[in-house]
Image (cartoon, helix red, strand yellow):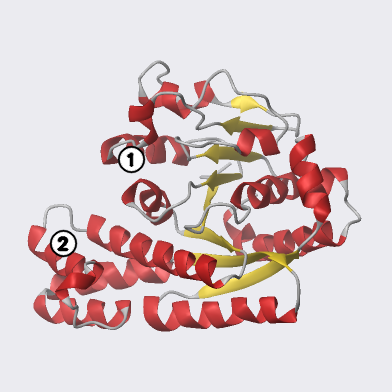
């Protein structure tokens, strides 16, 4: 077994269904014959365990960060899904809700060494560095949005901050390059760059050695879009427009891999602590999850089992 395919699942806004999407995609990957690990990277408000039918786990990321357990595998809790595990972010310790960069890097290094086919990393809400560092660390990412204008705006901000954060971390020893990248982030400075691509080319003229690493990092991004709680055809079109906007202004391709229709069965499955695809497999929403999982496998299976 090679390195796992690690996919971060975020979107900036809370309440758009990131944990629900994570649980259901993971359940269907298992059905497809893959082993799956789940990571709840929301140390301040973890709830993925509830979607997977677990009461509060007895150990989690906070125990690894604090040094109570030396190996990430030691804090993995087995699930009822075959050959699957969850590492929860549930924590009552306030200072562990915002791990520093070195602590996050420790988690990321250990994740890459886990023996499993897929690892799904459920990110917290927001677009600050505590969240976007995890997005920037992995080539694969899923953006979840409900299609409302506020959610799209949050998703765009999440992606932009994640990309800029990732580019900044390429040059940890070059404060001069980092300053120029951060000028794009700080709207008060009136950045001269309208798109990430323009910024890369502009910086490339000032620092020729930086152009290649930045281009390579952007090209390696594989970002997928999932729209949740879709009610009509107009909602579906929102995803297509959003993907075009991301490609134009953020200079990364975004693949729209599907939508999930609004269904009261989703709420019932959350209350029951069972993924929808396990509880109501014939529902229209479950059919959407099947389509999305098929698209995800088609785009990543060359790097898995």
Give the residue pinned by disc 2.
178
Question: What is the total number of numbered labels drawn onto the structure image?
Answer: 2
Q: Which element carries disc 1, helix, strand or loop?
A: helix
Image quarter for residue 62? top left
In this rendering, the label closer to the viewer, 2 or 1: 2
Give the residue pinned by disc 1.
105
Whether residue 7 is visible here, answered yes or no, is yes
Image: 156 above or below 277: below
Marks 2,1: beta carbons within 8 A: no
152 relative position to 187: left or right: right
Q: From the top left corner, tell me how far across and down residue 48 is, in percent.
A: 61, 38
Q: CA distance from mark 2 to mark 1?
A: 19 Å
Which residue is at 54% across, 73% downward? 149
Q: Give the residue furthest to the right.
A: 282
Q: Which element carries disc 2, helix, strand or loop?
A: helix
Q: From the top left corner, tell me how far across and down residue 304 is, in percent.
A: 61, 52
Image quarter for residue 168? bottom left
Which residue is at 33% across, 40% downward? 105
Image: 104 above or below 285: above
223 relative position to 135: left or right: right
Give 126 or 171, whichever is nearer the viewer. Answer: 126
């Amino acid at each position: 077994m090679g390195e796992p395919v690690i996919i971060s699942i975020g979107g900036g806004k809370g309440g758009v269904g990131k944990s629900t999407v994570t649980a259901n995609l993971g359940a269907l990957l298992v059905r497809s014959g893959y082993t799956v690990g789940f990571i709840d990277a929301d140390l301040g408000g973890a709830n993925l365990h509830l979607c997977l039918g677990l009461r509060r786990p007895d150990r989690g990321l906070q125990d690894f960060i604090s040094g109570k357990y030396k190996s990430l595998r030691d804090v993995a809790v087995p699930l009822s899904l075959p050959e699957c595990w969850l590492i929860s972010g549930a924590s009552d310790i306030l200072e562990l809700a915002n791990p520093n960069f070195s602590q996050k890097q420790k988690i990321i290094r250990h994740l890459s060494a886990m023996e499993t086919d897929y690892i799904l990393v459920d990110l917290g809400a927001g677009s600050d560095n505590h969240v976007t560092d995890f997005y920037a660390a992995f080539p694969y990412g899923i953006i979840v949005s409900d299609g409302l204008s506020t959610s799209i705006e949050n998703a765009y901000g999440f992606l932009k901050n994640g990309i800029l954060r990732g580019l900044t971390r390429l040059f940890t020893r070059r404060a001069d390059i980092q300053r120029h990248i951060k000028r794009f982030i700080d709207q008060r400075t009136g950045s001269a760059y309208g798109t990430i691509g323009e910024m890369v080319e502009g910086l490339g003229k000032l620092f020729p050695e930086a152009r290649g690493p930045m281009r390579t990092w952007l090209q390696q991004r594989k970002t997928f879009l999932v729209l949740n709680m879709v009610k009509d055809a107009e909602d579906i079109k929102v995803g297509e427009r959003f993907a075009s906007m991301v490609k134009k202004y953020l200079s990364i391709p975004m693949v729209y891999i599907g939508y999930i229709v609004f269904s009261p069965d989703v709420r019932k499955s959350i209350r029951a602590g069972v993924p929808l695809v396990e509880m109501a497999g014939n529902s229209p929403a479950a059919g959407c999850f099947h389509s999305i999982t098929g698209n995800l496998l088609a785009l990543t299976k060359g790097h898995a089992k």
